């Protein structure tokens, strides 16, 4: 089968076309003919850092995590799917799991679900990693109707799904962004936009919560921005973040009695730990998408499998609006 392989980690030009064996079916797995795959920030990190990132596969490596496609064969023990079903998931491209920059993947049945019927393969491929991340963060924070929720980075991959999910759950949603394009997208998704470049945390907390703070802060920016999240959160509030690899002063979090939730959605893939939770989340996300609660935002760019280097370059440029998707 056709694939794009990384023989030596490094720049966006690291990808090379290759013809590799079509994977064989295994018990508990499903053979999927891939229609589309999307590029996530972690994909670019693996390509850049290679062995310096513990979760990177050994070269030559088949990268790519997200996919949408059609089932061609079903392994022993799998009972919930049929040949011909359209599915989506996040199931490879790290450690010992072959990725999605190829025509086929043999994926663990616990890492996928039936794709939403009302969106395209390209849109479905954009959703799994960011959708699971946003869903997990909001659920762990105990989201419920009527709460005030602040999403940092609401125009990004994870952030734009978190905004829509929070709205779906009945929350009052606010989101930070920078520049007219990002703020317009945030507003179109149903959140009240906040320009972090011109508004201080103190000013927007006062403006939107009368100084009380937000019940939940979902921080898809993370790092040093977590101090802003602590400042913006209400007493006994919840802070969920996707980027916690940093050193921080937790004094504010202590005196507010905050709960911090670190979301690292790759754990089930890396450690074969509770993978069935991802299938359940993806199934739930499909229902939410079909009900009109979430619609993935996909960048207007169009890339084929042989153009994956260009797709990585676009994501790294910061100029993409929505997820960058590759058609296989």
Image: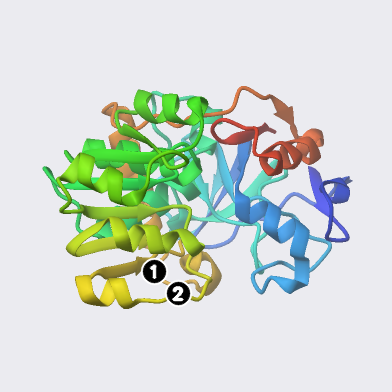
Between label 1 and label 2, give the one nearer the viewer: 2
Residue 200 sits above or below residue 185 on the image: below
Question: Tell me, what colour scheme is on the image?
Answer: rainbow
Q: Which quarter of the rendering shows the N terminus?
A: top right
Write down the residue under mark 2.
Answer: 248
Residue 125 sits above or below residue 77 on the image: above
Q: Residue at x 25, y 58 (%)?
A: 233
Foreground residue among 106 and 137: 137
**What is the x, y in percent for residue 175?**
35, 40
Instruction: Characterize the local packing of mark 2: few (<14), some (14-19) or many (20 or more) Cα atoms within 10 angstroms.
Output: few
- Whether residue 79 is visible, yes or no, is no
Answer left or right for 313 relative to 184: right
Q: Residue at x 34, y 50 (%)?
A: 201
Residue 151 sits above or below residue 53 on the image: above
Q: Quadrant of residue 167?
A: top left
Counting labels gives 2
Answer left or right for 28 relative to 327: left
Q: Residue at x 25, y 48 (%)?
A: 205
Answer left or right for 257 relative to 72: left
Write down the residue under mark 1.
Answer: 274
**What is the x, y in percent for residue 117?**
39, 27
Foreground residue among 191 and 44: 191
**What is the x, y in percent for residue 243?**
49, 62
**What is the x, y in percent for residue 159?**
42, 44
- Whether residue 163 is visible, yes or no, is yes
Q: Which mark is residue 162?
A: none
Foreground residue among 199 and 2: 199
């Amino acid at each position: 089968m056709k694939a794009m392989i990384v023989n030596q980690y490094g720049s966006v030009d690291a990808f090379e076309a290759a013809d590799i064996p079509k994977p064989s079916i295994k018990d508990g797995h499903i053979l999927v003919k891939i229609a589309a795959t999307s590029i996530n920030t972690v994909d670019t990190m693996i390509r850049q850092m290679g062995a310096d990132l513990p979760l990177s596969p050994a070269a030559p490596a088949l990268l790519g995590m997200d996919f949408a496609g059609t089932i061609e064969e079903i392994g022993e023990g799998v009972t919930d799917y049929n040949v011909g079903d359209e599915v989506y998931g996040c199931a490879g491209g790290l450690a010992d799991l072959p990725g999605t920059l190829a025509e086929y993947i043999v994926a663990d049945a616990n890492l996928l679900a039936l794709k939403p019927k009302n969106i395209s393969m390209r849109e479905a491929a954009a959703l799994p990693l960011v959708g699971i991340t946003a869903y997990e963060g909001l659920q762990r924070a105990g989201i419920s109707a009527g709460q005030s929720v602040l999403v940092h980075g609401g125009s990004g991959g994870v952030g734009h799904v978190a905004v829509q999910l929070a709205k779906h759950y009945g929350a009052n949603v606010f989101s930070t962004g920078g520049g007219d394009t990002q703020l317009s997208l945030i507003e179109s998704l149903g959140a009240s936009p906040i320009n972090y470049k011109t508004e201080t945390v103190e000013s927007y907390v006062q403006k939107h919560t009368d100084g009380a703070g937000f019940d939940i802060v979902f921080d898809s920016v993370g790092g040093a921005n977590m101090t802003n999240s602590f400042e913006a959160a209400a007493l006994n509030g919840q802070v969920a973040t996707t980027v916690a690899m940093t050193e921080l002063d937790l004094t504010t979090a202590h005196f507010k009695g905050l709960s911090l939730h670190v979301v690292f959605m790759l754990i089930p893939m890396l450690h074969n730990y509770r993978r069935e939770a991802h299938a359940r989340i993806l199934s739930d996300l499909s229902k939410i998408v079909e009900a009109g609660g979430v619609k993935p935002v996909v960048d207007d760019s169009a890339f084929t499998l042989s153009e994956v280097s260009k797709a990585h370059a676009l994501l790294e440029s910061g100029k993409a609006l929505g997820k960058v998707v590759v058609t296989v």
